Amino acid sequence: MPQASHRPPEALTEADLDRLQDLLDALPAPLEPLDVSMVDGYLCGVLLQPEPVPLAAWLPPVLDTEGRPTPARVNDDLLALLRRRHKELNVAIAGRQWFDPWIFELDETDDPSETVLPWVAGFAHALDAHPALMKLPEEPMLEPLAAIYLHLDPDDLEDADALLEEIESLEPPADLEEAVEGLVSAVLMLADVSRPLKPAARTGTRPAPHPAQRRRTPPPRR
């Protein structure tokens, strides 16, 4: 696994992102691949697993959301672009460094949750496909998971009473910038649980608490 001191690969350009989306769209039916924003959230969920997930395990859920058999050979450019982003995110998460999620503003909405929803859906897809993270102790993960899942419809969080209660205690982000800060900070907080730094590596500082984690007064219990 790359160490935090390793230089990350060059960030994907806008042209690279367009190429990646075109390659995903070109996958044959009936495959239903993730879009690029979902891919980004998915890769974060993969990289937060307590044990490294090999390419052979994390690639198929990118190519099809329904778990159908995927092509025996995948386009080399598609693989290269996915691996570059995987490595870039891995270096950032391992070093507890800021990264820019692939989140794209929607012209028709000012709702931060609606804008970040594809990224969050990709993250949730990763935790469904690779459940080891969710088998870790619940308490230290509640706050960062709530900061991510507050963007989902509560009806999508079945049998998650503790998580829903934590979500209710958080102040929703006021704008997209706060929502993005909340996602990145939550990923790095989860990494503290699933991928703890060795003592010698604790040289940096963790990001300051983000606005999405400001707590509001819980609603009165009935």
Image: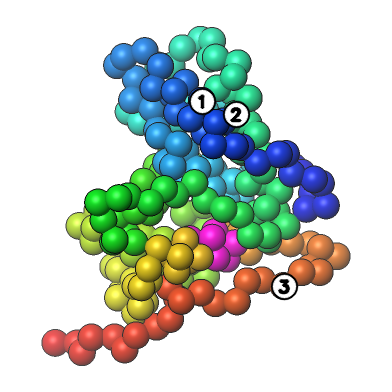
Which one is nearer the viewer's eye here, 82 or 127? 82
Q: Residues within 10 Å of mark 2 (few under 14, many from 20)?
A: some
- Of marks 3 and 1, which one's residue comes earlier in the chain? 1
Q: Considering the image in quadrants, where does the N terminus appear? A: top right
Query: Which residue does the numbered mark 1 point to in the structure image?
Result: 19
Q: CA distance from mark 3 to mark 1?
A: 35 Å
Classify mark 1: residues with Cα within 10 Å, few (<14), some (14-19) or many (20+): some
- Please name the amino acid that badge 1 sits on: Arg
Q: Are marks 1 and 2 in contact (CB under 8 Å)?
A: yes
Q: Name which residue lies at 76% across and 69% down.
A: 204
Q: Nearer the viewer, mark 1 or mark 2?
A: 1
Left of 205 or right of it: where is 161? left
Q: For the residue marked with disc 2, what is the amino acid? A: Leu
Q: Nearer the viewer, mark 3 or mark 1?
A: 1
For the rendered model, the colour scheme is: rainbow
Q: Where residue 146 appears, x then y in whole percent?
A: 40, 66
**Numbered range of the magenta stretch:** 183-189
Q: Amino acid at mark 3?
A: Thr
Occupied quadrant, residue 143: bottom left
Q: Magenta: predominant secondary structure element?
A: helix
Residue 58, image x, y percentages: 53, 32
Quarter of the image for residue 175 reads bottom left
Query: Which residue is the site of mark 3?
Result: 205
| 26 shown above or below 188 | above
As drawn, the label of residue 81 is: 2
Viewer-nearest residue: 126 or 214: 214
- Residue 214 at x, y percent in the picture: 43, 81
Nearer to me, 157 or 63: 63
Q: Residue furthest front?
A: 107
Q: Nearer the viewer, mark 2 or mark 3?
A: 2
User: On screen, 28 above or below 21?
Assistant: above
Q: Is residue 131 visible?
A: no
